[in-house]
Amino acid sequence: MLSDIQRKITELKKEQDVCILAHCYQTHDILEIADYVGDSFGLAQQAEKAPNKTVMMCGVRFMAETVKILCPEKRVLLPEPDAGCPMAEAVDKDMLLQLKEKYKDYAVVAYINTTADLKTECDVCVTSSSAKKIIERMPEDKILFIPDRNLGGFIAKQCPEKTIVTVQGCCPTHAQYNGKDAERAKSAHPNALLLVHPECSPEVTALADFIGSTTEIMDYAKKSDRREFIIGTENSIVQHLGIDCPEKRFYPLSKNFICPNMQLTKIASVLHCLEGTDGEEIILDEQTRVAAKRCIDRMLELGNG
């Protein structure tokens, strides 16, 4: 039974001094046994503060790498080794070096959804919620934004004083929907507000009532006095909001709005990782870790105040 598995996980994580992090896109049974739930960078910051010697990231590989970048002294586990991120893998280091040669006088801004290896060649890191503020505060006027063209384009519209070049990377889960999909959902639920992630296509964000990170979408829906919402991000958020706010109605932009990589991690994956029969420890050589951390440190410097 699920409750038995959750109870065993709770026992093992206490015995082994493990802090369990769960990204918002994980299923609710995993959120229930997590010590912290949130967006990727917020979770890495929680891992840094946690007293535990071992951290498990229930999410995808780049998120676990970010934890390791910030917590070199801790053992970092990824319960499903195959849980990757197509967006994070859309640009590799060789491609970025070629882009930097082409755009020599551009500062490279990396979305947090990038590999540790790629971050080593970037100037500043951003999250979806901090990107506008960070880029506005950068002294450079020319920006090469990687790897998400949709988020980069969304930020470019908000920062017209900057010249922002994007590449062809994207989140295939968010980018697959167009204006017709959004119009169809709004027609089916005329009283609902459309809340979407900036990784969505420009056609979708143009029709949105609110655009924000996963955490921002959830906060907006919880605080709003409206009662119906269409959620334009991973469908797990529809489930979570429905549980948190049973008096409100939440509808998916599409029934197929599912990230296959995020959904690879099951409650049994967490158990097996704790039992030592599955999962992977994330290892970064110190040179890569230190080089990757520089763009994160720069983000924090620009974001303070």
Image (cartoon, rainbow, N blue to C red):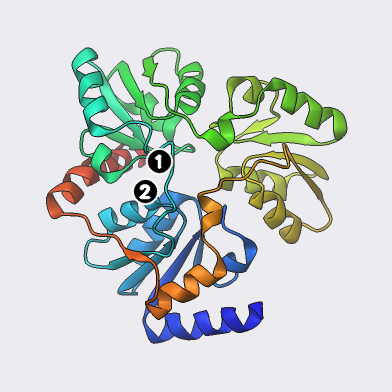
Which residue occupies the foreground of this view, 222 or 85? 85
Write down the quadrant of residue 96 in the picture.
top left
Residue topped by disc 1 = 113
- Counting every numbered tag in the picture gives 2
Q: In which quarter of the image is the N terminus?
A: bottom right
As helix, strand or loop, the secondary structure at mark 1 comes to loop
Write down the quadrant of residue 2 in the picture.
bottom right
Write down the quadrant of residue 19 in the picture.
bottom left
The amino acid type, in three-letter code, at marker 1 is Asn
Q: Quadrant of the C terminus?
A: top left
Residue 151: image location, x then y, percent = 48, 28
At a point 33% along the width and 51% down the height, the residue shown is 66
Q: Compared to 223, does 172 lie above or below?
A: above
Q: Is label 2 in contact with label 1 (beta carbons under 8 Å)?
A: yes
Q: Name, please, the residue furthest toward the left.
A: 287
Residue topped by disc 2 = 62
Q: Is 36 on the left-hand or right-hand side of 75?
A: right
**Distance from the alpha carbon under mark 2 to that under mark 1:** 7 Å
Question: Does residue 227 appear anywhere in the picture?
Answer: yes
The amino acid type, in three-letter code, at marker 2 is Phe
At a point 29% along the width and 43% down the height, the residue shown is 296
Q: Residues within 10 Å of mark 1 (few under 14, many from 20)?
A: many
Q: Compared to 176, does 273 lie above or below?
A: below
Residue 64: image location, x then y, percent = 36, 56
Residue 99: image location, x then y, percent = 25, 19
Question: Does residue 190 appear anywhere in the picture?
Answer: no
At a point 55% along the width and 40% down the height, the residue shown is 213
Q: Compared to 272, does 77 lie above or below?
A: above
Disc 2 or 1, which lies upstream in sequence?
2
Residue 168: image location, x then y, percent = 42, 22
